[in-house]
Image (spheres, rainbow, N blue to C red):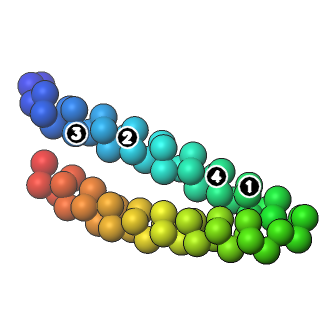
Amino acid sequence: MIVNPAVLSLAAEMVLDEAIRNYRIDTLHKKIDHALEHGDRLMFDEATSKLKSLIDESSVRSDSHKYFMEMN
């Protein structure tokens, strides 16, 4: 099986991006939990806003990923 280096590089980048995104989501969930436990409204608002943005961005990337996989 011959693998195009550009495709392999793109696939590796996609895996790394997903791992980083999952780490950020996990970190934000922990910040939200901490804010709720300590009644920190400012931290809660900031973390939930960042989480929402990250999830919205993830759904756009997911659609792009599906399109890429269908083409190959």
Q: Amino acid at mark 4?
A: Asp
Q: Quadrant of the N terminus?
A: top left
Q: Earlier in the sequence, mark 4 or mark 2?
A: 2
Foreground tag (2 vs 1)? 1
Residue carrying label 2: 15
Q: In terms of secondary structure, where does tag 3 sit?
A: helix
Tag 1–tag 4 contact (CB < 8 Å): yes
Q: CA distance from mark 3 to mark 2?
A: 9 Å
Q: Amino acid at mark 2?
A: Val
Disc marking residue 58:
none
Disc marking residue 26:
4
Q: Amino acid at mark 1?
A: Lys
Disc marking residue 10:
3
Q: Residues within 10 Å of mark 1 (few under 14, many from 20)?
A: few
Q: Amino acid at mark 3?
A: Leu
Q: In terms of secondary structure, where does tag 1 sit?
A: helix
